[in-house]
Image (tube, rainbow, N blue to C red):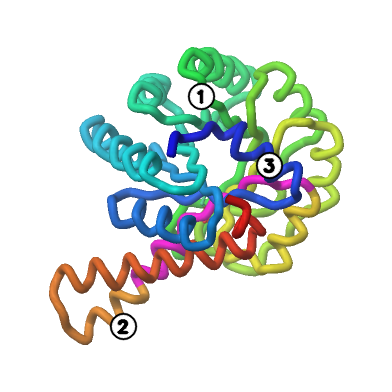
Amino acid sequence: MALVTLSEILKDAEKNHYAVGMFDIHNLEMASAAVDAAEEERSPIILALAEVHAGSVRQLQNLADVAVFCGRRAKVPVAVHYDHGQSIPYILQVLHRGFTSVMLDGSAWPYRENVEKTREAVRLAKAFGASVEGEIGHVGGSEGEVCGEDNSCYTDPEEAKAFCEETQVDALAVAIGTVHGNYRKAPCLDLPRLEKIHAMVETPLVLHGGSGLSEEDFRNCIRCGISKINIYTEVVQSAEKALRTDCMKGGGYLDILRTTTNEMRGTIAEKLRLFGSAGRA
Ligand code: 13P
């Protein structure tokens, strides 16, 4: 099936009040786990590659090709997205390789610099027919870390509105109390802030740091306007758990790959059901 853009995949989610899950992958097994879960659940999905996981340019190119290859073979709608991009040359690399969406994450930069770089990403992506996600406010922490550091800065609704108007992004990541990685204590989500942003901004809203949130948190966030949810930590940690338990009982490399991939597939499928996207493809 042809890949779809982020704008296209989020349109139905917004209309029908569910969220599309975005899952960062960094090898073929993770990409296969995500696509298999989406097909099983008949759900749209966003396959993503994060700049921080890319390592070298060669690795970025290889992983980008893996993501596009797996996405194109899927029997459900797939958008292939570049997560937390900060380098315009890297963004160009993935656009040339067929990505249908890129994030320019200027959330740690001064407002004006964030606007200028995001506009540059929008200009480039438009030439490839791809979408752009921006971020205003800052979701802190670090994916996969045992204790995500909370250096978040909550999104100001007025600033979010101005940012969307100035940049014309297709999706906006907002900071409302989530962090990347594991939580030290249960997150306290600022839902009134999210509702206000949603009322002021027409752009689809994105929740980063989805690992560790409860079923009720997801339900509330979707009700208050979130239509894309990013997950990474929980997926890799489900594989790590299987490695420590099942895989330690014996078996070779192939058994380890099969067991951990299957575990990640199950974790992703569960999220798709929670987000309400199952059965929508
Ligand atoms: P978690 O690792 O906390 O799930 O966050 C993932 C994320 O937001 C990627 O952009």
Q: Is mark 3 within 8 Å of ligand 1?
A: no
State the separation of the CA atoms marked 3 and 1: 17 Å
Q: Is residue 70 visible?
A: yes
Q: Quadrant of residue 187?
A: bottom right
Q: Which residue is mark 1?
A: 130
Inspect the magenta stretch and tell me whether residue 236 lies in it: yes
Q: Which residue is mark 3?
A: 12
State the separation of the CA atoms marked 3 and 2: 40 Å
- Identify the element where label 3 is drawn: helix
Nearer the viewer's eye, disc 3 or disc 2?
3
Q: Is residue 154 left or right of residue 142?
A: right
Label whose residue precedes the other's in the sequence (3 or 2): 3
Inspect the magenta stretch and tell me whether residue 45 lies in it: no
Residue 281, horizontal then vertical, whole percent: 57, 50
Count neighbours of disc 2 (C-alpha within 10 A) and say few if under 14, some if 14 to 19, many if 20 or more: few
State the separation of the CA atoms marked 1 and 2: 42 Å
Residue at the image position 48 percent from the left and 37 percent from the top? 84
Label whose residue precedes the other's in the sequence (3 or 1): 3
Decide: is 182 above or below 129: below
Decide: is 59 above or below 151: above
Front one among 30 and 152: 30
Q: Quadrant of residue 64?
A: top left
Residue 164, horizontal then vertical, whole percent: 71, 24
